[in-house]
Image (tube, rainbow, N blue to C red):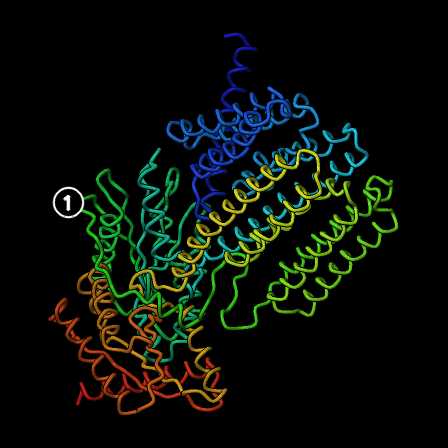
Amino acid sequence: MSPIGKAKQRMSRERERAYAQGGRDVEDRLAQIGLSPKTGWYTSIALYAVGGVPAVVAHLIEPDMYSDALFVLGGLAVAISLMSVLGLRYFPNSHRATHARLTMGLMILVIGGFTIGESRQAFLLLPLVAAVPPAIYYGVRAAIPYLIAAILFALILPWNISEPWGKAMGISSAVAVVMIVGSMMLAQARTRRYARSNRELAFTDALTGLANTRALRNAIDRALKSQDGEPPALFAIDLDNFKQVNDRFDHARGDAVLKAVADGIAAEGRPGDVFARRGGDEYSLLVADPAGRDLDELAKRLAKAIKVARKEACPEVTPSGSVAYVRAEPRDSVATILRRADDMLHDAKTEFHSEDTGPRPVRLAVIDHRSESDRAETECISEAEQFRRATDFDPTPTTGRLRGSVSVDRPLWFYNAIMNFVIGLTLAVVTAPGWLEPLSAYEGTIAAAMFWLIAGGSLAAAWRPLPASYVHVSFAIALAALSATVAAAGSSGAALIDLYAIAAIYAFHFFRARPAAIWLALTLSIFSAFALIGRFPYAGMHVAVFATMMVSMSALTAKVREVTSRFITENWRLSQVDSLTELSNVRALRARINEAVRGAESGGVRPALLAIDLDDFKAVNDSFSHTVGDQVLRAVSRAIGENVRVDDMVARRGGDEFLVVTELIDDDELEVMAQRVRDSIANSRLRICPQLVPTASVAVLRWQEGNDSDEFLRRADVELHERKLESKRLETA
């Protein structure tokens, strides 16, 4: 092959890689808000039909008014809608197809703009068909080219209309396009940030900041499915005698050790490695691409990092840890490789366990060929509704606020200010040259000043801040001001009515569904009244296009928000849940205790805590494996949940420690609950490990005046420590 041929081939491969990377980027951006590439196809099917059907119908009803070109172009739009059905079936994830269908839509609009005569003034908002989907789904970078094309379409085409207000119509329609697409970019950027934050919390250990078990299992699944070179390796890590830290000191010292160890071992990894805390003092490391790495040396470095971190945080207790690793084999599933890693760690601890402080030995697993199936995990009682009641959090992506409180949304006020400022600026620009006679430049300036005054009030409301519900008042005033301006412009008001589209879409972006639907209906009614009663040119078609575009855009916005809200809600729920037991985690626990303390300080019921610690739980992991230990923890979590009230929160604080937050008033009932919990835990542990100590230490204490949440938890730790010492004294007596 010639040098030129080789260069072309290389460039072709680079383009293919770029397209593939672009496709992955698109999928990643959609995944951030719970959507898939198929969503774009569904949107194209709907929007191209919405844009094409009115054009076809208009020509069929009034062929003398609307040209044959309009009929042909409308038919092409409907054809793209039908082709999108095939694209959804055969090319659901195609990056090229995404741009192809959007580009075809723009081409139809541009050709139509130059062939259908002055009736094009009724279709100036149609470029939203191509500009809105990338703004919603793919982000700013992908949306900008389509936005620019839509602006040019709306801005340039009306300028040769015979009426003097044609130029004003181009400016106001272009402004409407910019504001609608811009609002969607803004809303989706906020949604993505919020969704990404919740997603990270859902897959992050609340104490150490490492990945949690949920994230680890996902990473293992991806690594097993995408093996290109050497098989991935999974490390299992366990701290020696960690239980003594909590028993001899307190949980605060134990938490400090766990965080120090997490920081220490994470420093030994490389980009692409996944460090996770599986619970308690157990960690994992997934090396998805071990090519060229000395895993034995890595294991020794991990053991050394554990020793250094533990000596710094708590030198009084054995500062060592055991490390084992296995390599994946072809028949491995997520469950089997986790189980094999646990078995090797158990063997390492059994064989080499000692009380010295020297470095722990490292074991390399010999691959065994057992054919275990990936069994479903035992389901435990979910605490999702308890979290929801505990924090009363509203995960709506446009607000994200506490229900029942005075909700304040500064971005909502800021966007309201921008919207009114831009509308005012538009009025000032289009009235200054006298394009909107009989509306003079002076009257136009007064109208612009009204909107600027509303914008200033919105900024003041954001700065103060005022409750978000007051935005409805500002919205109503702005709508009334726009209507007064259109009425004052007389027949030239046709140039301004597309500005109503900004208000219609604004409502669906930032208001809840019911008030948004009311505002949309009111906006459409005002628009239609001005267009039809004022006998604006091509009023019927203008109303049809405006109504279908606004209804479809609003429905699309509402649907995307609903899907995204569900996605965010689920990730928020997961961020409050312990990934092993499905109980509340430390993050949700602290939120609930903070709320309970605030309620008690304001004269409410004094909350109480049941602090629970499983006796001699470490023997389960040491005598059997971490897999059996996990089974015990799930059984215990279920046992606790079955013996407290529905309104009580059950949380796993870490390892084998649990907390129940309750507002039981009667102290005798508290003791009865504590005894039920003890008995149920013993029964559940006996069923799994009858040869080991099945009991649990339970401490009960009330909130005392002057305690903040940290002091309340500290007292629970002290009380539980006393109960465990008392239990040990009874055993030795």
In the rendered image, residue 410, in percent from the top left (x then y), is placed at 63, 62
Q: Residue furthest top?
A: 2
Query: Which quadrant of the figure contains the C terminus?
Result: bottom left
Inspect the image, locate mark 1, and give the three-letter code of the amino acid beneath it.
Answer: Arg
Q: Residue at x 55, y 38 (%)?
A: 134
Q: Residue at x 44, y 87 (%)?
A: 604
Callout 1 secondary element: loop
Q: Quadrant of residue 82?
A: top left
User: Observer-nearest residue: 577 or 113?
Assistant: 113
Q: In this rendering, is residue 532 above or below 589?
A: above
Q: Is 502 displayed left or right of 648 in the figure?
A: right
In the rendered image, residue 188, in percent from the top left (x then y), is placed at 55, 49
Q: Quadrant of residue 467?
A: bottom right
Label 1 CA crowd tier, 10 Å (few <14, some 14–19, many 20+) = few
**What count of labels does the image hold?**
1
Q: In this rendering, is residue 26 above or below 214?
A: above
Q: Residue at x 63, y 66 (%)?
A: 470
In the rendered image, residue 442, in percent from the top left (x then y), is placed at 88, 50
Q: In this rendering, is residue 688 above or below 419?
A: below
Q: Is 497 displayed left or right of 439 in the figure?
A: left
In the rendered image, residue 292, in percent from the top left (x then y), is placed at 39, 38
Q: Badge 1 is on which residue?
A: 370
Q: Residue at x 38, y 59 (%)?
A: 574
User: Observer-nearest residue: 476 or 398?
Assistant: 476
